[in-house]
Amino acid sequence: MDKLLYNQLKLLSWDCIILEGASEQEEELMRDVLFTLHSNGLKNKIDANVLFVAGGEEKINHFEKKNPYLKIIRVVEELNKDYRYAITKLAHLSNIIDDLVNE
């Protein structure tokens, strides 16, 4: 992970959540995200303001409605233009972080 991305990540408090309905691919990507962030010395926080969320679309939509002030990054198998933040592979992580920090 490059130094700029690492410094951007230090500005965010984040956590990972897997809801009911997540596919095996989504769960594996979530583990990769968690491992990547932890391997760079960044720890997830329970009171995070940025959440990586995997699960069924209905579950994630409900979760977003209940948490309107959090930034939700959907971990999905297929991207959808309606999702503001979503990743389908680990390579998208740096673009998502840039978007969040530069918002």
Image (tube, rainbow, N blue to C red):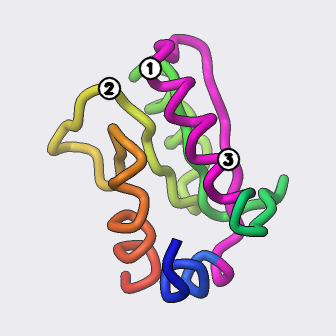
Circle 3: residue type: Phe
State the separation of the CA atoms marked 2 and 1: 7 Å
Rate crowding at label 2 as few (under 14), some (14 to 19) or many (20 or more) other CA atoms within 10 Å. some
Q: Amino acid at mark 2?
A: Glu
Pointer 2 with pointer 1, Cβ within 8 A: yes
The one of 39 and 99 positioned closer to us in this rendering: 39
Neighbor class of circle 1 (other Cα within 10 Å; few <14, some 14-19, many 20+) is: some
Q: Secondary structure at mark 1?
A: helix
Callout 3: helix, strand or loop? Answer: helix
Describe residue 36's horizontal placement relative to residue 29 as left or right: right
**Dot label at residue 25:** 1
Left or right of 70: which side holds 76? left
Place residue 56 in its image quadrant: top left
- Residue lying at the far right of the rendered structure: 46
- Which region is colored magenta? 10-38
Which percent across, then down, holds residue 85? 35, 54
Q: Which residue is mark 3?
A: 35
Residue 90 position in % (x across, y down): 42, 47
The answer to whether residue 62 is magenta is no
Cα distance, mark 3 to mark 2? 19 Å
Q: Nearer the viewer, mark 3 or mark 2?
A: 3
At horizontal 54% and vertical 54% (from top left) the residue drawn is 68
**Three-letter code for the amino acid on which mark 1 is drawn:** Gln
Q: Earlier in the sequence, mark 3 or mark 2?
A: 3
15 drawn magenta: yes
Instruction: Return the disc, 1 or 3, that comes first in the chain's sequence.
Output: 1
Mark 3 crowdedness (10 Å alpha carbons): few <14, some 14-19, many ≥20: few
Q: Which residue is mark 2?
A: 77
